[in-house]
Image (tube, rainbow, N blue to C red):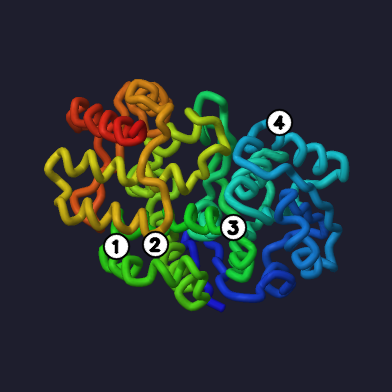
Amino acid sequence: MKTLTVNLKERRYPIYIGQKLLGQSSLLMNHIRSKQVLVVTNETIAPLYLEKTLSGLTDFQCETVILPDGEQYKTLETTNLIFDALLTHRFDRDCTLVALGGGVIGDITGFAAASYQRGVNFIQIPTTLLAQVDSSVGGKTGVNHALGKNMIGAFHQPQCVLIDIDTLNTLEDQQLSAGLAEVIKYGLISDAEFFSWLESNINALLIRDAERLTYAIEHSCQNKATVVAADEKESGQRALLNLGHTFGHAIESGMGYGRWLHGEAVGTGMLMAANLSHRQGHYSDEDLQRTQALIEAAHLPTTTPPEMNSQRFLDLMSVDKKVKSGIIRLVLLKGIGTSYISGDYDPKLLLATLDEFHHAARL
């Protein structure tokens, strides 16, 4: 087992990474304040891992909430089901919520924990690659609105993150590829050496080689932990982690939540960001080709939905957390491993990128 630390001074917490970690009560005991524990999961994960998780919590008063599975259920209405359970069982301010599932479960459970009695503890047990390398680490919690993704939420850090890579054995191939988008992101924004490693090992990751998966997860989590420790509330450097997300969120909300997986939308969004960077003269032909080749090798889409024309993109991108004074700020690239945030790009070049992808999607 590997143990990393998200160093937020007095609120620092560990990330445990390994195999056969579910059900090990010793890993969770020190992170639970009282006997009251609510495990939140979904209809897909419950039959697979709920019993094993509960076997490590036998000394506690455990209740469970099983939510429907899918991004379309990441709403305030669904979150109310968690509040209903907490109030029905009279959970107090020392209770602990446990998020057992992918990014949707982690985000909803964390948001419920941030809100219930103005903040209670929670633990992340992510079961998808995307959640393991990204959404479970860093304390971003929230729900979607019909007009914008993740626009309602709070920063609320977990007590610990427990990553059992054995849960990836039951993950659908499409979900595994979606998670690889966030892994590739770390190489693009700040780690050219890791990007090269991914080029050499992408096929091993796709067949779920345990050693290489562990390395990719550990390396991604370490990258994110370093950024979060330096900029917890996303006032600067942390926004770089949103590479491709402004484009990707537009796809998700424009198509209807759940039709495109988050990682799929981010994969295409990163390629769009690379395209715009190339148009500005900041990203070489070779880097653009390598970026597209790796995204394709990860079995991620490289074109936008044909329904999404340029104006639709611009309308949806204008409803984004990075918009300031009406200007859409984007994470762009100066080379593989070098990224920056800017609203000072030529809007005609942005439109050209959107038009190119829309044209390609209609072919």
Pointer 3: residues within 10 angstroms few (<14), some, or many (20+)? few
Q: Tell me which label, 2 or 4, sits earlier in the chain.
A: 4
Label at residue 102: none
Horizontal side of residue 191 vs 280, given as left or right: right
Measured from the top left, where is residue 210 in percent x and y? 52, 75
Residue drawn at x 87%, y 45% as measured from the top left:
89
- CA gap between label 3 and label 1 equals 28 Å
Q: Secondary structure at mark 3?
A: loop
Pointer 4: residues within 10 angstroms few (<14), some, or many (20+)? few
Q: Tell me which label, 2 or 3, sits earlier in the chain.
A: 3
Horizontal side of residue 261 vs 228, given as left or right: right
Q: Secondary structure at mark 2?
A: helix
Residue that numbered label 2 is attached to: 223
Residue that numbered label 3 is attached to: 172
**Pair 2/3: label in front:** 3
Residue that numbered label 4 is attached to: 77
Label at residue 191: 1
**Pair 4/3: label in front:** 3
Q: Are marks 4 and 3 in contact (CB under 8 Å)?
A: no
Which kind of residue does numbered mark 3 sit on?
Answer: Glu
Is residue 186 in view?
A: yes
Q: Tell me which label, 4 or 1, sits earlier in the chain.
A: 4
